[in-house]
Image: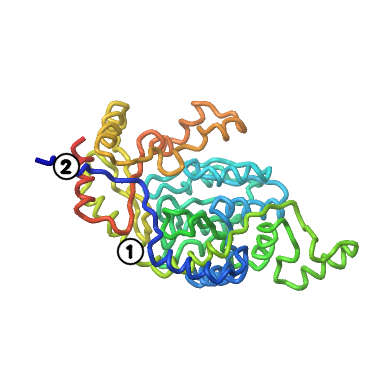
Amino acid sequence: MKKINKKIFSHKLMENNINYDDIRILKKFIKKKPIFTNNKKVLEFENKWSKWLGVKYSIFVNSGSSANLLSIAYLKNKFKKGEIIVPTLTWSSDIASVFHNNLKPVFADIDLKNLALSVNDIKKKTNKNTIAIFLTHILGINGLSNELIEFCKKKKIILIEDCCESHGAKFKQKKIGNFGTISNFSFYFAHHMTTIEGGMISTNSKEIYEICRMLRSHGLVREVKNRKIKTFYEKKYKDLNPQFIFSMPSYNVRSTEINAVLGLNQIKRLNQNITKRNINFKYFLKNLNKEKYFSKFDLKGQSNYAFIIIFNKKFRNKRFRYKFEKTLIKNNIEFRRGTSGGGNQMRQPYVRNMMNFSEKDFKKFSNSEIVHHYGYYIGNYPNLKKTKILQITNILNSI
């Protein structure tokens, strides 16, 4: 008699967002043998994204990290020097982009209810050298508040929104990415929508739009839309070919027509995917043991990217953490400790080597340290069934 294999339970961290319709659209486009580099489809996708988000301008680049890099490069070009307040809990490229542009990152702690920058700590860290605040909306939770927005206005500090994991999250019924001077998005293959790899810079500033267009493509002046800017450079540098005037030290972080075609198809189902992810997360929290796991997140306007797990105070010890991780591994549930950026960025080598922090410094950021040592996330995706979510919470609650 043939032995029947019992199905093994598993839950992966990410799921590929690309479906058969996306593949069909891509095949159709490729068969036309068009120009594949940055061209008409990129511009079409930028316009479509701007309309969806509710901003005037967008610049499509090859990753969310590149979007961060160009945003800070704009600040470097404008201010030359200064300090930028950054969260301890974020993705490495937010802080690395500050280092790359020879500006100074100033770390601030987070608030556990939304995992975003603590306004109280921002106020303590702000001084005459502060030129910007780099706010990360973590895992789909809105990090904005009236207090933060008013503080930025009062102090005339630029607010940059990192929305890479939070497409469609809202503050006061308006999509995040509309409140900062600049906002950045990622279209990594497992995010709310994907272009395989890709990112977007969005803004209502014509100046930022034009500068970022140049920064995206080697600093070339021919990339700008504004005729006055082109004329200025052409008259000032008459000895140069107008097609090859490089305005500033820059990069090549362009994306392609193929990525844009995929983005144009993906954006059609973005709102639906966001709704499904939010329903999943609410059901996950509803069935999670409130004694063991933190659940007091501010979910108003959320656009959940992943199931967030933080141990409550009583369970913040190495013994429970070991048991927790061992149980997830045993049940083939893929996870990440410290959330998507790996926890407190001050502990990372790329920061330590630049700023010489010690264990004593890390402990000053108490909420970030909680997430670093006792915070996790596991996968949430649109087609996840309630039965599986319940299986996952039952496993977590049994620990």
Which quadrant would the C terminus be assigned to in this image?
A: top left
Mark 1 residue element: helix
Residue lying at 42% horizontally and 55% vertically, measured from the top left: 191
Q: Quadrant of residue 105?
A: top right
Q: How crowded is mark 1: few (under 14 residues within 10 Å), some or many (20 or more)?
A: some
Where is residue 320, by image quadrant? top left
The reply to whether dot 1 and dot 2 touch (C-beta < 8 Å) is no
Q: In the displayed image of the protein, which residue is found farthest to the left? A: 1
Q: In which quarter of the image is the N terminus?
A: top left
Q: Position of residue 318 (x, y in %)?
A: 32, 27
Q: Where is residue 216 shown, x and y percent of the image?
A: 66, 58
Residue identifier under label 2: 6
Q: Which of marks 1 and 2 is nearer the N terminus?
A: 2
Q: Which of 299 and 47 is in front in this view?
A: 47
In the image, residue 135 above or below residue 273:
above
Residue 154, percent from left and from top: 58, 58
Q: What residue type is labelled 2?
A: Lys
For image coordinates 59% across by 28% down, the residue present is 356
Q: Which residue lies furthest to the right in this view?
A: 239
User: Closest to the observer: 68 or 252?
Assistant: 252
Inspect this view and state whether residue 163 appears.
Answer: no
| Residue 195 seen by the camera | yes
Mark 2: which secondary structure? loop
Q: How many marks?
A: 2
Q: Name the residue under label 1.
A: 275
Amino acid carrying mark 1 in the image:
Thr
